[in-house]
Image: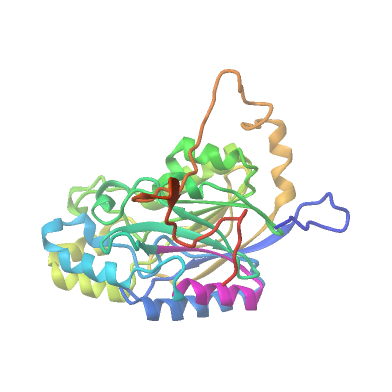
Amino acid sequence: MTNTSSSTGKDLPVVKVAAVHAAPVFLDTAATVTKGLALLAEAAAAGAQLVVFPETWVPGFPLWSSLAPINNHDLFIRLAKEAIYVDGPEIAQFRQACARLRVFLQLGFNERSRASIGCLYNSTVLIGDDGALLNHHRKLVPTFYEKLTWAQGDGAGLRVVDTRIGRLGALICGENGNGLARYALMAQGEQLHVSHWPPIFPTRPPSEGGNFDLAAATRLRVAAHCFESKCFGIISASPIGPEARALLAARDPAFADILDNAPVAATSFLDPGGAQIGDELSGETEGIAYATFDLNKCIEPKQFHDFVGGYQRYDVFKLTVNRTRHEPVVWEEDGRGSAERTPWVVAEDVRDL
């Protein structure tokens, strides 16, 4: 896709963006998709050109992973059964809606694997305003107890996609603290940076204090990226939601204290200097936050520190990124190597439904 800026061909777009701060219908994919399509339509009706949903929004973040894994097998099984394929009917519904509404969508979801019935990925897709699947990224390294749920991703989705509303890139949660992953996007001229986040990320019992301040850590990391990349940032987080709280609190009364008192996430927007702009939503308040980005404001700060241009030393530093999609096996047929690949696509090879 090309960047259709203005009739002069010199000005960059001014973009209205939306970040969803709403809970999924926990572990219910069909109901979550229905809710998501309604939120997408609401944001598009409000004039948003890009809509972002939180981390693993379909069908929810596995909060139970912070507890003893020997007690949570049934929840993992439910999540595995409700997780979706990137080429499945649920993503197809979002693609069709994007084409109908003429809106871009960045969606976080739990991804199933056809190679293993129990293998899940923490994934995100960028869908174009024509319904094309533009990029598919799997979280490189699940964080802390997330390793009990998700497999490691790969570098295939470390791509910035050039669209009519600007150059879009995305990272998931803790990846926004990975300087190498962030630089890989910066070096592709990223102008809009999407980041997905969970509702809470407990690291200690609340009674002990010293818990991970998710909203503060989120803003610190994304602000650093916006400042270094000179891009705009979108932070989309999720409330816990009534279904998740009821289910998890009923299983373990001690977890009710964690759900109610762990520091919560916030949804917000940042400018190329790392300053907050636009709306902000946090905690259990559901809604859609909006902001307007004038991408022309990405240019001036490059005079001061262009970390992928004049303020970099390529003779001193060198970064190599492997963007191969990892497959569990490569089959050799008639002496020719071929990998059986799932039919997801990237910007260079868009196939419609």
Residue 224 seen: no
When the figure is inspected, residue 317 is found, relative to residue 300, above or below; the finding is: above
**Name of the residue lying farthest toward the top:** 316
Left/right placement of residue 179 relative to residue 30 reads right
Residue at 54 percent of width and 37 percent of height: 183
Number of numbered discs visible in the structure rendering: 0
When the figure is inspected, residue 142 is found, relative to residue 252, above or below; the finding is: above
The quarter of the image holding the N terminus is bottom right
Residue at 38 percent of width and 80 percent of height: 30
**Name of the residue lying farthest toward the right:** 8
The stretch drawn in magenta includes residue 143: no
Residue at 54 percent of width and 41 percent of height: 225
| Residue 346 in the image, given as x and y percentages of width and height | 56, 55
| Residue 282 in the image, given as x and y percentages of width and height | 43, 63
Range shown magenta: 90-109
Give the camera-side residue of 303 and 282. Answer: 303
| Residue 189 in the image, given as x and y percentages of width and height | 65, 43
Give the camera-side residue of 254 and 32. Answer: 32
**Name of the residue lying farthest toward the front:** 334
When the figure is inspected, residue 209 is found, relative to residue 246, above or below; the finding is: above
The quarter of the image holding the C terminus is bottom right
When the figure is inspected, residue 222 is found, relative to residue 96, above or below; the finding is: above
Q: Quadrant of residue 17?
A: bottom right
| Residue 88 in the image, given as x and y percentages of width and height | 44, 72
Give the camera-side residue of 153 and 32. Answer: 153
